[in-house]
């Protein structure tokens, strides 16, 4: 994830354990912080696929592809095989793909024959196309149901173990970047359950598929440009890291590693926090921790901001406050402005600070309202969703309480 308009990352759903642990009791006791999901995705139609009879890459292609990147260094952990081999498609016959290759040669100096050989080995992934389609309309958003997917015993117990195993690194990241350990732990827990679910798709396959065969949707052109940019970033990342791009495995949308960074985010925000000479978000929890903290700081995290990340709010029947909801991913209203519109908190708000009003819809139940700080909105840049950001906050708090108990 990350810096996705990124919304595109599906997160695994875990069932509650039948026999609750101490962490389960703590999780069920929490009734704090929340945030609204902006369900992204788009309606779609299946693009025409090429013949499944396309031949596998021969040794000549492999030799040419090898010129594109050096052999990958020995991995710290054996990568899992991709979930889907995909459907062989001659992407190179597509005009848009040919233009992309020419751009990579002219703009970045890639060797034409090697790049052609590489692209001839890329497969079309129908499941990626299906997964970016939106959920069926009509089902109301439900914050509490969403929250229950993440603040649950399995994830809390795994978070306690991850925090214990990486306590020194988390403390160093907090000291370096000013991001609390519980927020970093919350993000990695929500994203991949601490590396358990990092995705098993070849990144080159899914990014090429979505860059040139995105389903029909109102924002199709913008999404195709985004994925085309991430395909470009994947090739640049592979060259910089001396790795075979076909070995890079991630989510159905191309997100990589424990924190689910898109290739462009790895290039822009990845940190070699273990100082071994490379940024490795797949195998290094240390690099993942430092990179998450760096991402948040680069997106507005304020280390000097004390107190809650979001304050519970009450709203008046006048509904003048409705105009303050959905006004961008930033805190830009004073407490006085919000109070005049009928949105106030029972807690004492810090003087001189700005807030954003967020709503967490609960289906048929009452909507929750919160006054969010800049640090809340920094988390939404990781995933543009109020629900997501509040889940990160709640999970991190639950893990801290379980660890301290």
Image (tube, rainbow, N blue to C red):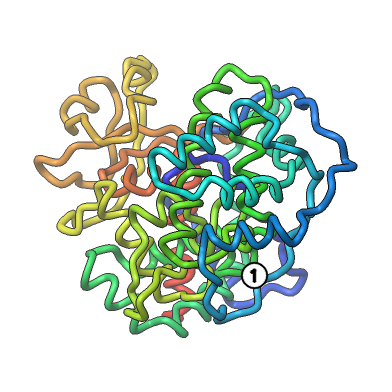
CA neighbours of label 1 inside 10 A, class few (<14), some (14 to 19), many (20+): some
Figure check: 11 above or below 292? above
Residue 209, horizontal then vertical, whole percent: 66, 38
Taking the image as drawn, is residue 363 in sight? yes
What residue is at 57 percent from the left and 74 percent from the top?
158
Question: Dot 1 lies on which element?
Answer: helix
What residue is at 35 percent from the left and 23 percent from the top?
316
Figure check: 197 above or below 219? below
What residue is at 42 percent from the left and 50 percent from the top?
33
Q: Is residue 67 left or right of residue 351?
A: right
Of the pair 201 and 136, the residue shown nearer to us: 201
Q: Is residue 246 left or right of residue 234?
A: right
Q: Identify the residue under disc 1.
A: 154
Taking the image as drawn, is residue 389 in sight? no
Of the pair 204 and 55, the residue shown nearer to us: 55
Of the pair 137 and 256, the residue shown nearer to us: 256
Residue 284, horizontal then vertical, whole percent: 47, 75
Figure check: 260 above or below 351? below
Residue 343, horizontal then vertical, whole percent: 30, 28
**Residue at the left extreme?**
352
Residue 346, horizontal then vertical, whole percent: 28, 42
* Circle count: 1
What residue is at 58 percent from the left and 23 percent from the top?
220
Quadrant assignment, res 206: top right
**Residue at the right extreme?**
53
Q: Is residue 124 left or right of residue 252?
A: right
């Amino acid at each position: 994830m990350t810096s996705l308009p990124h919304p595109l990352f599906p997160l695994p759903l875990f069932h509650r354990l039948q026999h609750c642990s101490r962490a389960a009791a703590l999780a069920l006791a929490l009734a704090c912080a929340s945030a609204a999901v902006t369900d992204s995705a788009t309606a779609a139609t299946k693009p025409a696929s090429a013949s499944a009879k396309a031949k596998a890459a021969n040794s000549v292609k492999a030799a040419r592809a090898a010129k594109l990147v050096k052999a990958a260094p020995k991995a710290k952990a054996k990568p899992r095989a991709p979930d889907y081999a995909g459907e062989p498609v001659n992407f190179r016959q597509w005009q848009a793909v040919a233009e992309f290759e020419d751009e990579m040669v002219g703009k970045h100096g890639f060797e034409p024959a090697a790049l052609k050989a590489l692209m001839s080995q890329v497969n079309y992934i129908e499941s990626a196309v299906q997964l970016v389609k939106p959920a069926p309309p009509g089902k109301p958003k439900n914050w509490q149901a969403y929250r229950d997917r993440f603040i649950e015993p399995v994830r809390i117990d795994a978070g306690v173990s991850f925090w214990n195993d990486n306590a020194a690194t988390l403390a160093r990241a907090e000291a370096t970047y000013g991001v609390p350990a519980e927020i970093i732990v919350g993000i990695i827990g929500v994203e991949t359950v601490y590396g358990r679910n990092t995705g098993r798709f070849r990144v080159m396959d899914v990014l090429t598929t979505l860059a040139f065969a995105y389903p029909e949707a109102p924002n199709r052109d913008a999404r195709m440009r985004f994925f085309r940019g991430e395909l470009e970033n994947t090739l640049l990342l592979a060259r910089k890291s001396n790795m075979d791009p076909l070995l890079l495995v991630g989510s159905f949308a191309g997100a990589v590693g424990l924190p689910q960074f898109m290739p462009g985010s790895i290039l822009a925000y990845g940190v070699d926090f273990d100082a071994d000479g490379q940024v490795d978000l797949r195998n290094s929890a240390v690099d993942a921790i430092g990179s998450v903290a760096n991402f948040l700081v680069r997106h507005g995290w304020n280390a000097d901001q004390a107190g809650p990340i979001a304050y519970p709010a009450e709203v008046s029947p006048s509904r003048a406050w409705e105009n303050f909801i959905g006004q961008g991913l930033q805190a830009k209203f004073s407490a006085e402005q919000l109070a005049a519109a009928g949105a106030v908190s029972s807690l004492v708000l810090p003087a001189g600070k700005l807030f954003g009003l967020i709503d967490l819809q609960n289906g048929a139940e009452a909507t929750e309202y919160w006054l969010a700080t800049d640090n809340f909105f920094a988390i939404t840049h990781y995933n543009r969703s109020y629900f997501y950001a509040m889940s990160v906050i709640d999970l991190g708090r639950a893990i801290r309480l379980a660890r301290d108990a």
